[in-house]
Image (cartoon, rainbow, N blue to C red):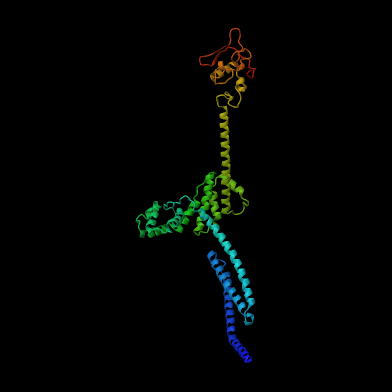
Amino acid sequence: MATIKATDNFGEAASNQKASQPLLVATTNGLIRKTSARMAALKRLVESLSESEGIQLLQYYEIKSNTIMQHWNQLGCLHDELWENFENPLMSGFNQDEYYQIEDLVQQCLIELSIKLDQLRNKQATVAEPNMRSSLPLPKVTIPNFNGNYLKWRQFFDLFTQMVDNQPLPAAQKMWYLKSHVTGEAEKLISHFSITEDNYWAAWTLLQDRYNNKRVLASTLIDELLNQPSFTSTVAAVKNLHDTTKECLLALNHLGVQTTFWDPILLQVLIKKLDQAMLIRYEQSLAKPKEIQNIQEFLAFLELQFQLMEVVEQKDKVAIKIKANRNNSVSSAVTVSKGNNNCKLCNVDRHPLYHCRKFLQFSPSQRLDWVKNQQLCFNCFRNDYVVNKCSSRSCTKCNKKHNTLLHLEVNNETKQNIQPSSSGYNTAVTTATANTSTGHRL
């Protein structure tokens, strides 16, 4: 009986195995199909990135990277399940080589995406830094008033468009700003419009129709370019010729006017604006004087000239300032001040009066008169006390209270009489000629 039962169990197991075989095959095929589908999706995602090289959006590459990572994680789970539950999926048609190829492709793609994301994040940080600095308090930008000058229209139009027209403001408020910033002819043009919502668009369009006139703008710029005044060689004049010429040509090019072939005619006109000295310098600067010159070379010459003139002017200003300071120093040095040894006669050098060549060339009587007029001490030539209080030693010839340079040689009929006066200064009566050989006070 036992043998029969075992036989029956074996048969039942074999029967169950035969019944489960189709289910096993179906499960394996299902996992293989899911794995193949996921690999195909990953391949399409990676290949689509080659078509987006011009895209510079950080969010685009972040989404792409996250999507590829999700697909790859799901593919990895399917691959693990396939090999865990089934003995040999390769026998059921699973392509392991294709899986390895997709794995390499995804890894390479993720590396490239990581590099791209780092570049975009760095670029975004670089752009954000000036924006952070721009949050600092800056001077208020004001819209210049427009008076109907065609040359000023583009500047007014650009600023007003950015600061008012493009802003989320009520149309009536924009109309108020518009009427507040037009004067002269432009103001008269829209003066009949009241400040209302409906009138703003009509007034703004009317101004654009009038002044956004390329033909008139071009004509005005050409007149400005050709009718520049002649000048003498000054920094301001050379700068004005250079800047006006350059600005007019740039404005004409902005309007679509081709000025490429204007150079010979334009140079002929502009060269006549130069004075003789500047014209000679221009001719000497030409590397190829027999060739046709272009306007850019002429503008470069003007720019070099006013830069050189500015350097020379700056040096002249510095030299004048140094000379003035030096004169002030000399003047201060020779100014008579209390208790110093500055020369009070020649005003040339810092030396005592008794070393002054001019003073030594005087006769004793002339020296005495000059000292008396200056109200100096007759003994030491200072001006802060009277001779009676002077502690310096007296004349070495007569031992009187006066400097040896003031000593007078008297004859029998006259004599030297030096007495203190009521003012505290010495007076002297002299009638003789002194010996001028003494060059210092003893």
Viewer-proximal residue among 322 and 100:
100
For image coordinates 36% across by 54% down, the residue present is 191
Q: Residue furthest top?
A: 412
Q: Where 125 falls versus 311 (above or below)?
A: below
Tell me: residue 206, above or below residue 423: below
| Foreground residue among 270 and 20 | 20
Task: Give the camera-side residue of 209 and 370.
Answer: 370
Disc count in the image? 0
Q: Which part of the image, by quadrant, shows the N terminus? A: bottom right
Give the image location of residue 295, x and y in percent. 56, 53
Classify residue 409 as left or right of residue 220.
Answer: right
Q: What residue is rendered at 64% in x and 91% in y? A: 3
Q: Where is residue 263 in the image (x, y as percent from the top left)?
A: 55, 55
Whether residue 47 is visible here, answered yes or no, is: no
Residue 64, above or below 9: above
Q: Is any atom of residue 69 visible in this view?
A: yes
Give the percent coordinates (x, y) of residue 241. Answer: 52, 49
Query: Residue 234's quadrant in the figure?
Result: top right
The quarter of the image holding the C terminus is top right
- Which quadrant holds residue 49? bottom right
Residue 429 screen position, x and y as percent: 56, 12
